Amino acid sequence: METFDIVVIGAGPGGYPAAIRAAQLGASAAIIEKEQLGGTCLNWGCIPTKALIGASEIFEKIKHSAALGITVTGAAVNYAAMIAHKDKTVGLLRNGIRQLLAGNRVKSFAGVGSFVDRNTIEIATADGPVRIGAKKTILATGSTSAMPGFLPKHPRVVESRAFLDLKQLPASMIVLGGGFIGCELACMAAMLGVKVTIVELLEDILLLADADVRREVRGHVEKNLAIRILAGKPLEHISADDQSVRGKCGDETLSADLLLCAVGRKPVADRLALENAGLKTNERGFIEADDYCRTAVGNIFAIGDVTGKIQLAHYATAQGIAAAENAVGAKPRKHETIVPNVIFTSPEIGSVGLSEDDAKKQNRAVKTGRFRFSALGKAIALDETTGFVKWIADDATDQLLGAAAVGPRATDLIAEAAIAIRAELTARDLGRAIHAHPTFSEMWMEAAHAVHGECIHAPPRRK
């Protein structure tokens, strides 16, 4: 039986970086993946959705290009070609991961891995079971779309993975769930001409974002993309047949060609046979791990979505690298906790650190600085003026605690805010740093000045 220093189960954005980092540190490493290298993020999540959203945004800009003096006639969407581009992108990146693993001498196994005991893993492969030894194991099995039992089983009712496999868009769709997955795909479809209704049980969409950020997005999508949002009521009595899918929301009956379920994700841990290794999931099905990615069993680590912490690909990557270093025996270090969150709606959202709403709930004294894109030269020149950025700073020390951006390039802009917060900069420090003109990044400098009421390009505060 072949034995490895480190065995990683799951080759998603947490798993394959963990295996590569372990190999870089001199450990013999193996990785087990039951489907495709890259996991959900690369194959059915982050990358394919952004390929489609990117194409949709181009089409949306073409429709409004007359404002910039460009007249386009006959622009049309070939959704099958968009899907082909998406698939090509995924294939290129998947092959890149394969080459990286091979280049770092990580041995790959295709199949389902489960514990025989804490140091032995059996892999159910297409050619039969294979057993390998594992001095230490990193669990990175991720999560999958949750499909509530009350939904009918019908081709017109899909989750995000099946939606991305469609070769043709419906004329109309209901999105069940107003979180980031539902809102991203709703915006993408609406930009391509689909009539979209979002139904959210809670009082608003995107509830993890600050209220002012939510208002900005909701106002834009309702006015500019004609997305209808029904919040605060459930979708009930759902049925589907060859003609349509229907449901009752309050006193209204909704009907559409497709229902996209985007109500959340659940952990994938049921096929690991954790009990054979002396480990178990918690009451919600997650594998608990500490800030060093260690589980209750000394030689087993867990990272990513399966731990029930922040379900973001880049967070899983950071955890994976930390877990590999800790497992190989380097000086133990905690995984990073300053985690930027990005949402590819229209407009985009980026946030990091303490939110303004959370500061209020904690009765924490903070001050804020806000600057709108409509006052920025670069944004006006490109006719991309929706939204704002804001800083949340400690009222006494001026230290930057959190930030949010909603508008053009928000998902890229948030990187500067994450670094500033991690470095414990003050609003004064950030404001004094020279930012190139004309660029979108000037937004952060202007907002930092606004914290102190000293913003050059905004009206003075009323006394």
Image (cartoon, rainbow, N blue to C red):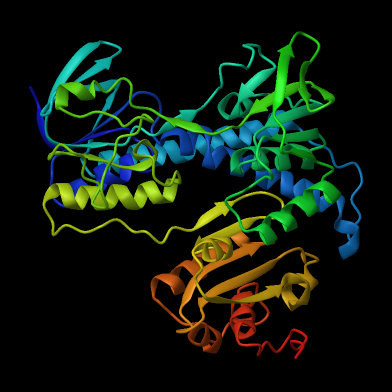
Q: Is residue 39 left or right of residue 186?
A: left
Q: Where's residue 129, x and y in %?
A: 21, 12
Q: Residue at x 58, y 32 (%)?
A: 263
Count of marks placed on residues: 0
In the figure, residue 209 lies in which quadrant?
bottom right
Q: 341 and 385: which one is in front? A: 341
Percent position of residue 196, x then y: 78, 34
- Residue 33 appears in the picture as rendered: yes
Image location (x, y in percent) of residue 251: 84, 26
Quadrant of the image containing the N terminus: top left
> In the image, is residue 415 above or below residue 453?
above
Q: Residue visible at 64% across and 81% down?
A: 446
Q: Quadrant of residue 237?
A: top right
Residue 202: percent from left, percent from top: 65, 40
Q: Is 357 displayed left or right of 399 in the figure?
A: right
Question: Which residue is pictured at 73% across the width and 56% down the height?
Answer: 215
Name the foreground residue: 212 vs 326: 212
Q: Please give the name of the residue rendered at 48% of the width and 86% of the height, measured from the top-left corner.
A: 429
In the displayed structure, would residue 91 be above or below residue 423? above
In the image, residue 136 sits, relative to residue 158, either above or below, namely below
